[in-house]
Image: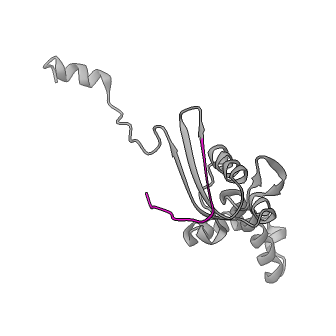
Amino acid sequence: MARVETDGTIGSYIHGGRIGVLVALKGGSEELAKGIAMHVAAMNPAHVRAEDVPAEFLAKEKEIALSQMTDKDKAKPAEILEKIIAGKINKIVSEVTLLGQPYVLDTNVTVAEALKKEGADVLSVARLAVGEGVEKVEEDFAAEVMKQAGLA
């Protein structure tokens, strides 16, 4: 894990002993930092900002959006088609980014808007969940018994 030196605020939140989040903000209050940490625990955004979303992901989502369009939509002029697709992609990017999501403590604003109200910005986020990233080995129980019995 990277070390972050900040003149801002560090917020932490542990949910049920299973999910832990640390958030470093530039500016803001401890209350806001903790609220953002709670948001990350609940919503588990894949990325912080829109520019953090990989180009491959965006290309795949564009492909999906195109495949879901009706023939009537596809018959529209190219510039209109691009605007429709861009709108769908922007919606998806909002859903997968911390700053684009509706803030769980005030769903009338996005996380970005909540930060802006307090003159804050996210420097870094770390979210850990018990068992996350642990590979579970699936074994054939009957084959294992036969092997231990010397029959396999």
Instruction: Say above or below: 54 vs 142.
Output: below
Q: Is 3 within the magenta?
A: yes
Q: Which is more toward the observer, 55 or 145?
A: 55
Horizontal side, residue 152 vs residue 136: left or right: left
Task: Reply above or below: 107 against 50.
Answer: above
* Residues shaded magenta: 1-13
**Residue 17: % across, % down:** 54, 33
Between 84 and 44, the residue placed more toward the observer is 44
| Residue in the image at 81% along x and 83% along y | 79
Q: Quadrant of the C terminus?
A: top left
| Spot occupied by residue 61 in the image (x, y as percentages of width and height) | 65, 64
Q: Residue furthest front?
A: 7
On screen, residue 36 versus residue 70, left or right, reads left
Quadrant of the snapshot with the N terminus = bottom left
- Residue visible at 76% across and 47% down? 104
Q: Quadrant of residue 63?
A: bottom right
Residue lying farthest left?
150
Q: Position of residue 141 (x, y in %)?
A: 31, 23
**In x, y percent, where is residue 11?**
62, 51
Residue furthest right as drawn = 108
The answer to which image quadrant residue 49 occupies is: bottom right
Q: In front here: 31 or 20? A: 31
Colour theme: one colour
Q: Main secondary structure of the magenta part?
A: loop
Q: In the figure, is residue 129 to the left or right of 107?
A: left
Magenta-drawn stretch contains 45: no
Count the marks. 0
In the image, 29 versus 132, the foreground residue is 29
Q: What is the quadrant of residue 66 in the picture?
A: bottom right
